[in-house]
Amino acid sequence: MMPTSLPTHPLARYLLHLADDQLVMGHRNSEWTGLGPILEEDIAFSSIAQDQVGHSLAFYEILHQRYGLDNPDQTAFNRPENQMLSSWLVEQPIGDYAFSLVRHWCYDQAVALRYESLSQIQDPALHALATKLRGEVKYHTFHAHTWMKSLLHGSEESRLRMLSALKEVWPLALGLFESWPGETDLMEEVGTTGQGWYPGEQKLQMQWQARALESMASWGVDVEASGLQRMEPVLGGRQGYHSEYLAPLLEEMTAVFRLDPQAEW
């Protein structure tokens, strides 16, 4: 079966960004199962991964029911790489624990901000969904904040490794807020209806960055000396252009599905 083409409705495209990011991030986080530095973290990353895949399913179901995309399994596992709208941040291999923790912190803060925004929508179903998922992701952000603070306040080695990971992750995290086709249309649509829940990627990035830098400063990070505010974003994912890591990841993610795409589990 050929996959449904990308949705043209701006809200549908926005929801597909959220779904694809959560699907890929969930798969990456699941790779920590059995590898966590301590048992607590092994369980934590596995639990977060399960939540993220569940969130992606919820969005894929709405996209199927409202906008005519294929059923969730087909949409998740039967699209070519250039129809995936995930960001480069989520596609990267798990690396060491410092990298995955900083990515988790940056990413889930952005997700929390998007759910906070989406929960203001007047659409009853989407409002209810965003409110529910917002409640779940707060545990992700709590986990990330706790360990970020602990390791930045830990030994000299832990602090240096976290600062190094921040510099590696930050440009990728900025790419979460890449402009995308239909962004202006969605901003105009929500503005016309008087809702205003979607302010656009630039403003979302500014809000995210302000929160992140404030937290880092409270943990003793010299934000100005770090150079983070002068870094350029890594872009491409929202346009269907991806890092070298997505194609092999998709091969792994879809291996069982491709054995029998029509199977019911």
Image: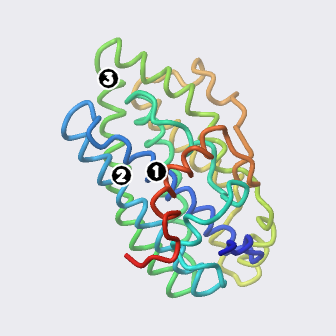
Instruction: Tell me the residue at 36%/66% (across/down).
Output: 135
According to the image, label 2 marks what residue? 140
Nearest to the observer: residue 154 or residue 216: 154
Nearest to the observer: residue 159 or residue 235: 235
Instruction: Please identify the residue farthest to the top as the structure is shown.
Output: 156
The answer to which quarter of the image holds residue 173 is top right
Instruction: Please identify the residue farthest to the left as the structure is shown.
Output: 39
Instruction: Tell me the residue at 35%/59% (across/down).
Output: 50
According to the image, label 3 marks what residue? 153
Judge left or right: residue 208 versus residue 199.
left
Going from N to C along the chain, the mark reached first, 2 or 3, is 2
Characterize the local packing of mark 3: few (<14), some (14-19) or many (20 or more) Cα atoms within 10 angstroms: some
Is disc 2 in contact with disc 1, using a CB cutoff of under 8 Å?
A: yes
According to the image, label 1 marks what residue? 108
Residue 169, given in percent of the width and then of the height, sits at 55, 33
Mark pair 2, 3: CA separation: 20 Å
Instruction: Tell me the residue at 69%/82% (across/down).
Output: 194
Mark pair 2, 1: CA separation: 7 Å
Mark pair 3, 1: CA separation: 21 Å
